[in-house]
Amino acid sequence: MATNWRSCPRFPVADLLDVRLCTAPFDPALELRNFTRALPQAGGIVSFLGQVRAGDGVEALDLRHYAPLTLPAMRTLAGQVRGRWALDGLLIIHRSGEMVPGDPIVLVAAAARHRRDAFAAADFAMDHLKSESWFWKREKVAGQWRWIEPRMQDFEDIARWR
Amino acid sequence: MAARLVFLGRLEELAGCPFADVAFGAPLHWADVLAWLGDDQAPELPALVNSDKVRLALNGMMVTDKASLTVVDGDELAFLPPVSGG
């Protein structure tokens, strides 16, 4: 996979928070390995990888963001997650731009002393990224782009945390 | 004086461009913005962006009350339709 690391700069909110918006492909395995190595004190690390789903004739997925809002809101979310659970570290990497089936879209990893906090933190982060983060999505089917509307399931997922 | 209007998501398709620069002689209020959108961009845009579904950001800050909006020289006003999930 061609990877342009310079397009994927690190913007750590604090020592333990690594939040990035990438406009080029990233390598989830490498990112997870680096994150894990940096946190030997964490007893458990839970990660979630979202990738472009193959099927339904989807040829490409295009995620658009708005620079003044998208990354700042991701960093705010990371701060909320960190305030809610006792974490050793939190990693959030989100793609923007055009992708093809199989490409990674989002990687979330939460590291904690105990696994329950790590599971819950990663779950919370993903639900909020899916329903509240500033991304607009369109997909290409049979050569035609069409915008994707919000799904009711996303609103139900986030309501679990209120 | 000029300001930039940014159209996100499907609004870009309706407006026909990702952003547009609007020139004006006096600060723009919400009604002025709506009138400009209808005249210069697309007739269906004003009703759409005036609905609760479309939110606004002025220079990266969320606008809580559209009616009290004032756009001055150098501002960037973004129109944000519902997000479709990451």
Image (cartoon, rainbow, N blue to C red):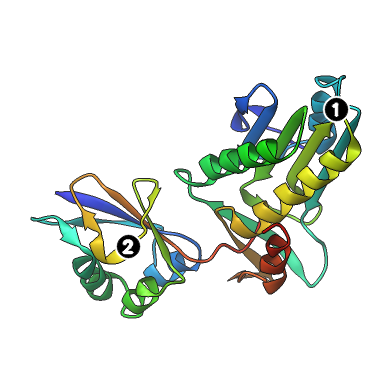
* Cβ–Cβ under 8 Å for marks 2 and 1: no
From the viewer's perspective, tell me whether residue A96 is left or right of residue A3: left
What x and y, as percent, mark residue A69? 48, 46
Foreground residue among A98 and A20: A20
Residue type for callout 2: Asp
From the viewer's perspective, tell me whether residue B75 is left or right of residue A23: left
Which corner quadrant of the image does residue B77 belong to? Answer: bottom left
The C terminus of chain B appears in which quarter of the rendering? bottom right
Same chain check for tags 2 and 1: no
Judging from the image, mark 1 belongs to the subunit labelled A
Residue type for callout 1: Arg
What x and y, as percent, mark residue A44? 90, 33
Which corner quadrant of the image does residue A52 belong to? Answer: bottom right
Pick out the residue farthest to the left. Answer: B25
Foreground residue among A118 and B31: A118
Which corner quadrant of the image does residue B33 belong to? Answer: bottom left
Look at the image and tell me whether residue A10 can be seen: no
Q: Secondary structure at mark 2?
A: loop
From the viewer's perspective, tell me whether residue A132 is left or right of residue B15: right
What x and y, as percent, mark residue A78? 64, 39
User: Which residue position is annotated with label 2?
Assistant: B65
Q: Image point 27% across, 70% down: which residue? A: B37
Q: Secondary structure at mark 1?
A: helix
Q: Residues within 10 Å of mark 1 (few under 14, many from 20)?
A: few
Specify the label residue A33 is tagged with: 1
> Real-space Cα distance between discs 2 and 1?
45 Å
Look at the image and tell me whether residue A91 can be seen: yes
Q: Image point 54% across, 44% down: which residue? A: A73
Q: Residues within 10 Å of mark 2 (few under 14, many from 20)?
A: few
